[in-house]
Image (tube, rainbow, N blue to C red):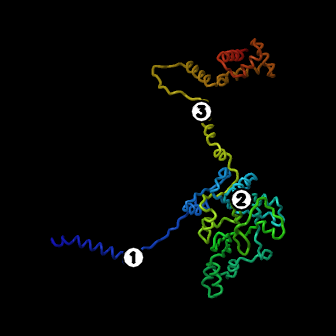
Amino acid sequence: MASLRKWLPALLALLVLGGSAAYYALTEPVTTVHRVAPDGSVLRDPFHAAQAWLNQREQPTRRILSAAALFPLPDTDTTLIFDKQRGLMTRDQVETLLNWVMAGGDLIVAARPLPASRDEDTATEEQWRDNDPLLYPLGITVWEIADEDEFQELEEDPLIALLAMMPMFAGDPLQYCMASDNEELRASCESLLCDAPEQPETLQLHTDDDALARHIQLYSDHELWHDSWDEEDGFEPHREWDTEVIAYADNEFGSQLVQLSLGEGQITVLTDLSLWDNDHILYYDHAWLLGWLSGHDSVWFIRSVAMPPLLQWLWQRAAELILALLLLLGLWLWLRIPRQGPLQPPRDDEHRDYLQHLHASGYFQWRTEQQDALLGALRQQANARLRSYHNNDEKALAMAARDLNCPSRVLHSALNDTPHSREQLIEQVRLLQALRSNT
């Protein structure tokens, strides 16, 4: 028995070691991924992933949602990225922004095509300028990509056509299609239902700064055009600022990225910014392009240059003044609002009669400037007696004043004006009581 107790700890240790060794020998670690819905801030910010990636590169980022937050412009070591939904900029704002670029700033802009209600071929120069007052003076216009089948009858959706081929008795068309003995039908079903949708053609970036071939993908059916390319055909350029194309990205349909030099800075124009949204920044060279354009600068993503609400604009411009006015308003209300004094406990030995309470009530109304309330009932009775003199108010007033042996204006004042002194109140009460009692 003693020997068993002696070896029991060693046996337990061997069992634990053997169990641990068997666990690690017979099992292997498995990593699982649990997908959860993104936070609301991510859903509201399409460039959340791009901002997080830039912050990892120690490039501070900001979201700008109004002109008040954008102007005055930051230093030229900040890259500004303008979305299509930036609102209409004034001429002064455009000139300020382009002068900022000439001083060395970097600007990235999503071009804005003409609305569907306007025809590109017949649009006037003023309509082009009003549509995008920022890019048109630089010689940039946006054109819809010509489709070869533009004037042909639209083809029917292949999936709808496939479902129309199914027999009427097929309760589940998908199951019938995938389990069909017809290999051609089954192959068509697999292609339509399982293959990934067709992606747009990638763009190759042409620049002298990078030797590697860089590719990006933009989801746009428009192309960019710089008016310097019209000079080759003998057309006069319409740009107002001296710009030069230093890089571009295109495919067989045309250019969808154009980089211009303007003074000491540069402007990069894209047909769309979807390559940097949360779903597409990880593909191709999209992240590299954002880093290449911004360098080591801080980056501002600008959603709107429209005027913010008036209260927001005032708060951003004069917060100290607004706080001072609110403080003055609070002090004025504190002085003007009637306040009760401290509550005193009632005395058992103090009993006041009704006349004392009536006097205290009247004095309170007088002290709180409620003189008209004191005289309201008496004036109502006096006016009723006055109407018994005559139907005409002026004649009735003159007749009553003659009976009371006082001027008409004094009686009129007693009936209508607010007394401002104790003597004036007593005189008005005397006249009103005399009029009421006059028979």
Q: Amino acid at mark 3?
A: Leu
Which residue is drawn at the image coordinates 35% and 75% (left, top)?
A: 23
Question: Height in image: 327 above or below 314?
Answer: above
Q: Position of residue 356 (x, y in %)?
A: 55, 18
The mark found on residue 263 in the picture is: 2
- Asked whether 309 or 271 is in front, the reply is 271
Circle 2 or circle 1, nearest the eye:
2
Q: Which residue carries the number 3 mark?
A: 331
Tell me, yes or no, whether the two marked residues, 3 and 2, touch with CB atoms within 8 Å: no
Q: Please state the horizontal and vertical placement of residue 32, each as a whole percent of the image.
A: 47, 71
Q: Is residue 218 above or below residue 410?
A: below
Q: Quadrant of residue 19?
A: bottom left
Name the disc covering residue 426, or none. none
Please name the residue shown 74% across and 54% down the image. 95
User: Disc 3 and disc 2: Cα gap in Å?
Assistant: 55 Å
Q: Please tell me the numbered disc located at residue 27.
A: 1
Task: Specify whether 92 is left or right of 185.
Answer: right
What amino acid type should be assigned to the residue bearing mark 1?
Thr
Q: Which is more N-terminal, label 2 or label 3?
A: 2
- Crowding at label 2, few (<14), some or many (≥20) Cα neighbours within 10 Å? some
Dot 1: few (<14), some (14–19), or many (≥20) neighbours within 10 Å? few
Residue type (three-letter) at the residue carrying disc 2: Gly
Horizontal and vertical percent position of residue 354: 55, 20
Q: CA distance from mark 2 to mark 1?
A: 66 Å
